[in-house]
Image (cartoon, rainbow, N blue to C red):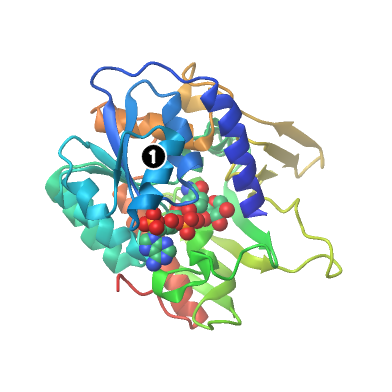
Amino acid sequence: MAMAIQALTFLQEYFYESGHKIRKNDNALRIGVLSTAMINPAAILRPADSHGDVIISAIASRDLKQAQKAAKSYGIPQAFGSYEELLREPGIDAVYISLPNGMHAAWAAKALDAGKHVLLEKPFTANADEAKSLVALAKSKNLVLVEAFHWQWHPASHTVKALLASGKYGNILSTYARMTTPVGTMPKANIRWKYDLAGGSLMDMTYVVSSTRYFLDAGAPKEVVWAKARPAKEDSRVDEAMEAVLKFEVGSTGRVVESKVYTDMARENVAWVVPRIWELPSIEIETEKATIYYYNFMMPHLYHYIAITDKATGHTSYTKAYQGGPLWGTRGESWWSTYRWQLEAFVDKVRGKEPVHWVTLESSIAQMETLDAVYEKSGLGKRPGHQ
Ligand SMILES: NC(=O)C1=CN([C@@H]2O[C@H](COP(=O)(O)OP(=O)(O)OC[C@H]3O[C@@H](n4cnc5c(N)ncnc54)[C@H](OP(=O)(O)O)[C@@H]3O)[C@@H](O)[C@H]2O)C=CC1
Ligand SMILES: O=C1OC[C@@H](O)[C@H](O)[C@H]1O
């Protein structure tokens, strides 16, 4: 289902963002894009349309023709036939990197070395060792580097977090986050099936760990209780699916809870024929007094709900938030996608303003430590770094 909601985001942004193109500031931030990936329009090109302080000034591909084609389609002034050439361009302030997972660390490092700020696609790197080196480099260069966990900037995510922090529902007892896509919908040639590019379901659907850690305010897990991978038929080193139970400390309270995560790039159909199109990325958070279910936490701009079921009465109340929320206040628009909220925060950070929320470098290291630990426990071993 993940790919289908991605396609809906393309449409949603096409209609809303292109209808809200605005004049750019004279000294707008100039962003270059490394690769002609499928995700680019949704994650950066369309969101930039409605941001007055961002110009997408260049795009690079391994193939100059591909770069030129993308540049023409999206009105990008410069096209390069290699990533290196774009990085050598002095007029570019920041880069958005949408390369395969296994290439994130190496190219983010080259971008930082070239003096560019970096908005880096998830997962941050192939493993925690790479994450640590990259973070050290970004700090030494005093440049912005951030993992593009777009959903964390959406008002609905902040609303769930505020509900949990309100104290009204008591302590968190457990969580369960799930993300799946129906069997047969992810083409076998896709980067997500490639071991050498650090593919795999948990790497791709790293959101289940990210959402768990965000709502628990947790770092790396205390323990991975168990982890079970379903290896891909074509390459048994790649997890077609991953299920795991982890123990996390909630913030720094000393309280430890169990969290289940489940990712699946080939979710079986109901009775072998009906794809589970309703199974959008979701997280269930059980607290002492209620169960809070955030449906479609990954693309909440398309549709989401937050259901709160009172344990004492069994009554369920629903809420949602497409705009504002506890962090953004009056800023932003109800039609903004998660990627547009993310861009707003990224530009704030680069401009030296305090963003309303941030995915810290320490959090990205902890995220990769968590993925490593689950892969190790599953027996597949952590993902390989750059080849
Ligand atoms: N934030 C989000 O919502 C999403 C994030 N992502 C993340 O974005 C990244 C890209 O994903 P996606 O758009 O699906 O990827 P694509 O396969 O569509 O694009 C990857 C791009 O990387 C470049 N590339 C360089 N080397 C290789 C190689 N050996 N094999 C394949 N491609 C190569 C290619 O660009 P070129 O030929 O132009 O050089 C290619 O277009 C991933 O890290 C993924 O996790 C993906 C989807 C959604
Ligand atoms: O990040 C992602 O979000 C949407 C999904 O389609 C995709 O598999 C994943 O990479």
Give, as a three-letter code, the residue at label 1: Ala
Residue 69 % position (x, y): 42, 44
As drawn, is 110 to the left or to the right of 98? left
Residue extending farthest to the left is: 140
Residue 115 visible to the viewer: yes
As drawn, is 310 to the left or to the right of 41? right
As drawn, is 135 to the left or to the right of 312? left
Ligand 1 quarter of the rendering? bottom left
Q: Does residue 282 lie above or below 102 as drawn?
A: above
Residue extending farthest to the right is: 271
Q: Residue at x 57, y 70 (%)?
A: 244
Q: Does residue 191 lie above or below 113 as drawn?
A: below
Density class for disc 1 (Cα within 10 Å; few <14, some 14-19, many ≥20) is: many
Residue 87 % position (x, y): 21, 48
Q: Residue at x 63, y 58 (%)?
A: 178
Residue 163 % position (x, y): 58, 35
Choose between 19 and 300: the one closer to the eye.
19
The secondary structure type at the circle numbered 1 is helix
When asked about the image quadrant of residue 173, the answer is: bottom right
Name the quarter where the C terminus is drawn: bottom left
When asked about the image quadrant of residue 302, the answer is: top right
Choose between 340 and 218: the one closer to the eye.
340
Q: Residue at x 39, y 29 (%)?
A: 344
Residue extending farthest to the front is: 65
As drawn, is 174 to the left or to the right of 339? right
Residue 249 visible to the viewer: no
Q: Residue at x 49, y 83 (%)?
A: 379
Choose between 328 and 339: the one closer to the eye.
339
Q: Which residue is mark 1?
A: 71
Name the quarter where the N terminus is drawn: bottom right
